[in-house]
Image (cartoon, rainbow, N blue to C red):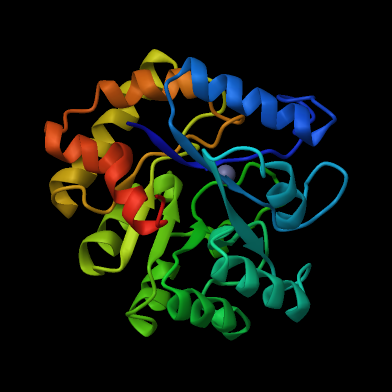
Amino acid sequence: MIIDCHVHVNQYELIHHIPVLDDRIDELQKEMTSNNVDYAIILSSYKTNSERPSAKQIIDAIKKYDNLGVVAGFSIDNHTDEDLKNYRTWIKDGLVKGLKIYSGYEHYYPYDERYQKIYDTCVEFGVPAMFHTGDTYSPKGKLRYSRPLNLDDVAVDNPELKIVMCHLGNPWIQDAQEVIYKNKNVYADISGLVIGIFDHFFEKMIKEKVAELINYAGEPKYLLYGTDWPISSMDSYLNFVAKLKIKQEFRDNFMYKNAKELFKIS
Ligand SMILES: [Zn+2]
């Protein structure tokens, strides 16, 4: 079984020019089928516009599918208390499986007190908070906000909060592995390490870094499979993870069991 805990249905001009949301979701289904992916979690964006559907638009668009879930994006600048109220209702109804903060894209530190209501909501309902960490796809992102070390503060101050560090903090994977090792409430997804497909040299380099992370942080109870599709290729990602040296029981945790438990996927 495979759970991809990190995909998008935004329209990305350069890589995924499909103007209609329903068509992008059809495309996602096709990709999942051809790669034997059983379930995927769609992350809504930090803002809503014609290219970036809101959590509500995604919830409505995926009603007919039982193999898709939503994690709702939240930003201080573009979301309101009304949005959070709706998120709370959808979490209760099982329609939203977590919340996501786009540190770096949004120019605030993850420990900014204006995010605290998000963390409190996640703890109250037992759902995870995901964070963008590492390099930003947009040159307008500011990297000091997306460094993985910032999440140590959030993890320590919110010991009940389950935190998912997206993208392993790449390229600050060493910082990420320490935050994971030290804090039992920190998880990480492996998504978005590449735009498109892995080339041979990059794959080799990242493979070594991930091996070091697993050696350092211990058996990967914290590690989640995700791709960042359509930014990263599902097919290339599966090829990449097949080459990681992980014991079979840990591989099952990594490929679906950890995510199943964390996001309460039935
Ligand atoms: Zn992403």
Q: In the rendered view, does 225 fall on the left or right side of 115? A: left
Number of numbered callouts drawn = 0
Q: Residue furthest right?
A: 50
Q: Is residue 107 visible?
A: yes
139 on left or right of 247: right
Q: Quadrant of the N terminus?
A: top left
Q: Is residue 13 left or right of residue 193?
A: right
Residue 233 seen in the figure? no
User: Taking the image as four quarters, which one is ligand 1 found in?
Assistant: top right
Q: Residue at x 27, y 37 (%)?
A: 209
Q: Position of residue 84 (x, y in %)?
A: 68, 75
Based on the displayed image, in which of its 4 quarters is residue 92 positioned?
bottom right
Q: Residue at x 78, y 67 (%)?
A: 78
Q: Residue at x 32, y 55 (%)?
A: 261
Which residue is located at x 77 percent, y 78 percent? 82
Question: Residue 137's spot in the image, x, y percent?
Answer: 63, 41
Give the answer, above or below, for where 25 lies relative to 139: above
Check the image and report above or below for 33 versus 232: above
Q: Position of residue 16 (x, y in %)?
A: 73, 25
Expressed as whole percent of the image width and height from the top left, the position of residue 243 reads: 25, 21
**Side of 30 relative to 25 (left or right):** left
Which residue of the protein is positioned furthest toward the front in this rendering? 64
Q: Nearer the viewer, residue 246 or 148?
A: 246
Above or below, comparing residue 216 to residue 203 in the picture: below
Position above or below: 227 against 145: above
